[in-house]
Image: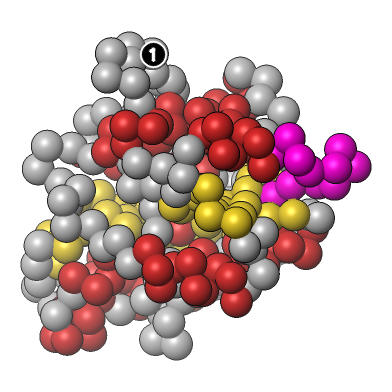
Amino acid sequence: MKILRTTAELRAWRKSLPSHESLGFVPTMGALHAGHLSLVEQSKESCTRTIVSIFVNPTQFGPNEDLSRYPRPFEADCSLLEKAGTDAVFSPNAEEMYLKDASTFVVEEKVSIPLCGEFRAGHFRGVATVVLKLFNLVQPDTAFFGQKDAQQCAVIERMVRDLAVPVQIIRGATIREPDGLALSSRNIYLSSEEREIATDLYRGFRAAQALFEKGERQATLLKQVALQEVNRSGRFQVQYWDVRHPETLELVEQIGEAGALLAVAAYLGKTRLIDNWVLTPKA
């Protein structure tokens, strides 16, 4: 497995690949878990070669967020990726990715506005900018992102569509612990007590799913039954719990044929957790 630290090394590696080989790309910020590795596996199944980026992107963190303490177990991450059969890892530093006087950014102005966009000013500008730059450098045929970050997926899909970027975007399913907690690099911040409470988010989704399967289509009622589970401990500080169109992320009052995305962001102690659940009507 090649470890590439500079854009020059990355471009040389990319140029060395035979033109008939397909390249899959998994962008990450490191602190890898089974969710990331499932994306690597998807890439390996559908592409000839697979490259993973590990870059904690400073432009998507706000001034009071956890950039400085974000976990960076680089050697452990590389060990996992090598065992998974990854061909290359691109892990630059911030100086390599951003010029000191950089003044060009990518701004998506619709699907990035609600949900996390309302609470994390500039976050998706940072995401879209770094992903487009990585696409330009890696030149992948296909890129793989986790459904857990559903709004991020929507922003990237819209960017790729609007700017005619020749990359296919694949969403990998959210990987969960046996008790339903979505895997996240930030889960390590939870205390043992908070870790038990965190599964109430999943219980909320399951309660809404059960009501949906009984035929309920009113978003208000689905939200109400889910929040009863989320709020039962009294420990969550919910930023948002919304029922949204799965593609446009517009608010939904009555769920139709397109189904709906249940999206939540909530603080448990000092840890901000996000998760989502897709409701799909049966054919």
Closer to us: 135 or 115: 135
Q: Is residue 224 visible?
A: no
Report x, y in % for residue 68: 16, 51
Looking at the rendered image, the quarter that the N terminus falls into is bottom right
**In terms of secondary structure, where does tag 1 sit?**
loop
Report x, y in % for residue 105: 39, 18
Looking at the rendered image, the quarter that the C terminus falls into is bottom right
Decide: is 242 above or below 107: below
Q: Quadrant of residue 82?
A: bottom right
How is the model colour-coded?
Answer: secondary structure
Name the amino acid type tagged 1: Thr
Decide: is 190 above or below 173: below
Any magenta on residue 20? yes
Closer to us: 13 or 196: 13
Residue at the right extreme?
A: 20
Any magenta on residue 210? no
Decide: is 198 above or below 39: below
Look at 86% across and 38% down and name the residue there: 19
Report x, y in % for residue 140: 69, 39
Look at 38% across and 13% down and name the residue there: 104
Q: Which residues are magenta?
A: 14-24
Residue at the disc numbered 1 = 104
* Category of crowding for the residue at label 1, using alpha-carbon neighbours closer than 10 angstroms: few (below 14), some (14–19), many (at least 20): few
Look at 38% across and 32% down and name the residue there: 96
Q: Quadrant of residue 136?
A: top right
Q: Is residue 85 visible?
A: yes
Look at 51% across and 33% down and name the residue there: 7
Report x, y in % for residue 70: 23, 57
